[in-house]
Image (cartoon, rainbow, N blue to C red):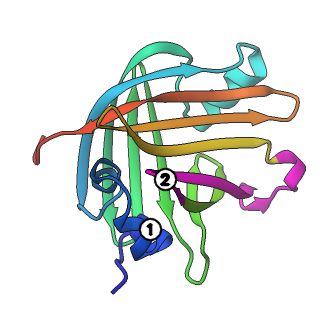
Amino acid sequence: MTSVALFPNLLGDNAWRSLPAAVRAMHGAAPILHANGLADVAGAGHFPARWLRHLLGLPAPGPQQALALTIQRNGTREVWIRRFTGRRMQSVLDRNPGSPLLYERLGPATLGFALHRDGDAIDWQLCSLHVFGVPMPRILHGQVLSRSGMRDGRYHFSVDVRLPVLGQLIAYEGWLEPLPDGH
């Protein structure tokens, strides 16, 4: 039987079960999850990149930023609230009926990702981009490299977003560990 949780549903039972426990814990079906960790954040320093990061609620560049994550789940809908040092970043992840994609809404942008198991990790491949509900041509998607897996026994994530003309909008990489229930 296929799970109603977002990530198991999109990846399929076999791929889901073959992922490490640390990855399944972060992307599973628990109604609420709290995790803490550290992230290194990078990004272009010019004004347009700083402005767009601010518009989208993305963190400012800086090394070894404390990171607190809360995931609130209801069926396939997940609200991710990330608190980087000095900045709150919120996105909503869900799927559309009949679509094989995970959709992440971040401010006025909605990104559509195909998820694939790659060894002990989930590889997120950008397939669509909508801004204020308007589909953007492929040339404006830029490049999004996103991966979540396990390293040194912990959940590890890596995201790198590069846009035409602007260059590296943001890149963040680090680890998270779930907190005991109720914290």
The residue depicted at 65 percent of the width and 21 percent of the height is 43
Q: Position of residue 109 (x, y in %)?
A: 66, 50
Residue 15 has which mark?
A: 1
Give left or right: position of 133 versus 79. Answer: right
Magenta region: which residues?
117-140
Give left or right: position of 164 versus 174. Answer: right
In the image, residue 171 sits, relative to residue 94, either above or below, namely above
Characterize the magenta stretch by its predominant secondary structure. strand
Identify residue type, mark 2: Gly
Identify residue type, mark 1: Ala
Q: Is residue 129 magenta?
A: yes
Q: Position of residue 98 (x, y in %)?
A: 59, 84
Residue 14, quarter of the rendered image: bottom left
In the image, residue 132 sits, relative to residue 48, either above or below, namely below
In the image, residue 149 sits, relative to residue 63, either above or below, namely below
The residue depicted at 45 percent of the width and 74 percent of the height is 12
The residue depicted at 32 percent of the width and 56 percent of the height is 24
Query: How many discs appear?
Result: 2
Mark 2 vs mark 1, foreground winner is 2
In the picture, which quadrant includes the N terminus?
Answer: bottom left
Q: Position of residue 3 (x, y in %)?
A: 34, 77
Give left or right: position of 90 versus 129. Answer: left
In the picture, which quadrant includes the C terminus?
Answer: top left
Q: Position of residue 158 (x, y in %)?
A: 53, 35
Q: Is residue 125 magenta?
A: yes
Residue 147, quarter of the rendered image: top right
